[in-house]
Image (cartoon, helix red, strand yellow):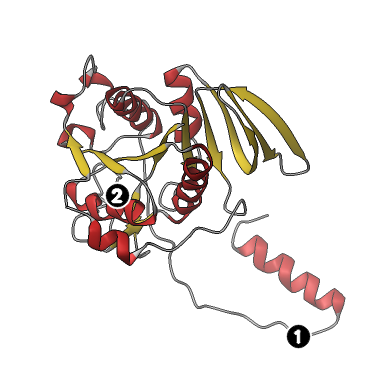
Amino acid sequence: MNIIVCVKQVPGTNKVEVDPVTGVLKRDGVESKLNPYDLFAIEAAIRLKEQTSGTVTALSMGPNQAIPSLYETIYMGADRGVLLSDRKFAGADVQATSYALASGVRKIGTYDLIICGKQTTDGDTAQVGPELAETLGIEHATNVVSIDAVDSDSITVTFSLDDCFQTQKMTLPCLITIDKDAMTPRLPSFKVKKQCKGDEVTVYTVADLDGIDENRLGLKGSPTQVERIFPPEKNNEKQIFRGDAGELSDALADLLAERKFI
C-alpha cells in the first residue's frame, strides 16, 4: 500500500503577528513545529505500512523552513518527504491549499490512501482534507477513530459523528482524516535520524508541477479573504456584586444594559 500523509508546519507559539494588509500570519522567524494533529496521521500511516509492507510519503506545502518537520516524519517511520515551496503558494486559503496539494499528489504518482490530521492548530478549519479529496475526485471520511480492516482494494474505518459512531467501507484510493484519540504517536527514532543521508526530502516549485493553473494558487487564487484577524484584548477588569438573589440579578441586568448586551 502506497500512502501519502499530508502534514503542515505550524507556529510553535501563540505570539504570532498578523499582516494588517493581507490578514495572514507572519511566519518568518517564528518558532515552528509539526502540527500536533498530523502526528496521529503519521502514526496511522506507519502502522498500515508495517501491516501491508507499503510506503509512506509525507507531503507538505510551505517555505523551506518546513523541511525539518518533514524529516521528523521520516524519523518516525515515513520513507520520504515532499515539500511544495514557492512564493506563489503564499497566502492560500483552504481551497487554494487543497488545489496545490492535489497537484503535489499527482506529482508523487500512484497512491492507495491519503491520510490527513483532523485539523491544524493555526487554521482550525478541518477543511483541507475533505477539499483535497473532492479536488482529486476520491471518497473520503473524516474524524476517523479507528482503521478496522484493509485489503487490496478497500479500507474500512469507524468515524465519529459527535453523538454516534459510523463504520464505512471505501474503495481505494481514498482519503481519511485521523482524530487525535485514534492512537498514540510513536517518538522519532534517533537511530533512523543517524542513518538519514540528507536527501530524503524533495522540494518542488510551481514550475515542477504539471498542468497547474497559477490563477488558483496562493492569495490570488483564494476565493475567501480574511477581513480582520487580531489577538484577543487582555482585560483584567472585574466587578464584585454582593447581595441576595434579587439584588444580584438586578445588578447583573443593569451591567448588561450598560454594556449594551441587552
The location of residue 27, given as percent across then percent down, is: 24, 54
- Amino acid on which the number 2 mark rests in the picture: Leu
The residue shown at (80%, 71%) is: 249
Can residue 125 be seen here? The reply is: no
Q: Nearer the viewer, residue 64 or 42?
A: 42
- Which residue carries the number 1 mark? 242
- Image quarter for residue 6? top left
Kind of residue at badge 1: Arg
Which SS class for mark 1?
loop
Please say whether residue 258 is visible from this viewpoint.
Answer: yes
Vertical comparison of 41 with 258: above or below: above
**Residue 232, x across and y down, in percent:** 44, 62
Which disc number belongs to residue 196? none
Question: Between marks 2 and 1, how big is the CA–CA gap?
Answer: 57 Å
Task: Compare marks 2 and 1 and give the one earlier in the sequence.
Answer: 2
The residue lying at 17 percent from left, 46 percent from top is: 199
- Tell me the tag on residue 70: 2
